[in-house]
Amino acid sequence: MCRLLLDSPYFLGIQPLSDLDMEAKAQNEHLLTTARMQLEEQEDEIKALNEMILQVRRITQRQLYPSSHHVFVQAKIYSIRDAQLAEQEEIRREQADEERRLDDMMEIDRVKALQRLEEQEQQLKTVRQRGAREIRTQVYRCTLGA
């Protein structure tokens, strides 16, 4: 009986993930992948916009009196760049929040697993003590009957 208890998945602490847990995990991984791809795309766009800003600055520095068109283009570039930087920061914050949430979930799972393991060890200890008590009783009865 003790052998069967030791080999069971319950005592080994093996608990398969539920469908809900697996779905949440897949969704979280998809969100993180999407956020990372958006960050990479935005970094490329920001580099291109910075290059455009440098080009506009070079052009305007050559001219003594920059035209209103160049000023408008430069203002537009700055506003687009600022908007993208703000969006990128928002994505970073969301990604950090999601990672904290996942870390919290994993910590809760870890604590629950430790509690289950302690309960299993206590149950196993109880089973062993009961078995030892029974063996002592049998040995005592055998010595009395002999």
Image (cartoon, rainbow, N blue to C red):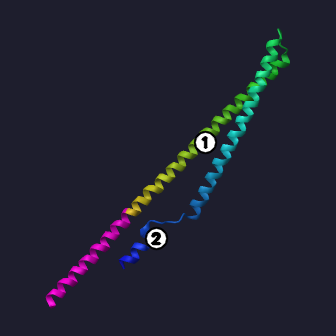
The front one of 96 and 43 is 43
Q: What is the CA distance from the residue labelled 1 to the residue labelled 2?
A: 38 Å
The amino acid beneath tag 2 is Pro
Residue at 56% over, 60% down: 21
Q: Secondary structure at mark 1?
A: helix
Q: Residues within 10 Å of mark 1 (few under 14, many from 20)?
A: some
Q: Secondary structure at mark 2?
A: helix
Residue at 25% over, 76% down: 132
Instruction: Point out residue 121 in the picture as x, y percentages from the top left corner.
Output: 35, 66
Give the quadrant of residue 40. top right
Disc 1 vs disc 2: which is toward the camera? 2
Give left or right: position of 3 versus 132. right
Residue that mark 1 sits on: 94
Instruction: Point out residue 11 in the picture as x, y percentages from the top left corner.
Output: 41, 69
Give left or right: position of 128 versus 82. left
* Residue 124 against residue 75 in the figure, above or below: below
* Residue 21 against residue 74 in the figure, above or below: below
Residue that mark 2 sits on: 9
Which residues make up the magenta segment? 118-146
The residue lying furthest to the top in this view is 64
The front one of 31 and 45 is 45
Closer to the N terminus: mark 1 or mark 2? 2
Give left or right: position of 26 versus 42. left
Instruction: Point out residue 123 in the picture as x, y percentages from the top left corner.
Output: 34, 69
Residue at 43% over, 67% down: 12
Residue at 78% over, 25% down: 52
Does residue 135 belong to the magenta stretch? yes
Q: Residues within 10 Å of mark 2 (few under 14, many from 20)?
A: few
Instruction: Point out residue 105 in the picture as x, y percentages from the top left corner.
Output: 51, 52
* Residue 59 against residue 79 in the figure, above or below: above
Does residue 26 belong to the magenta stretch? no
The amino acid beneath tag 1 is Glu
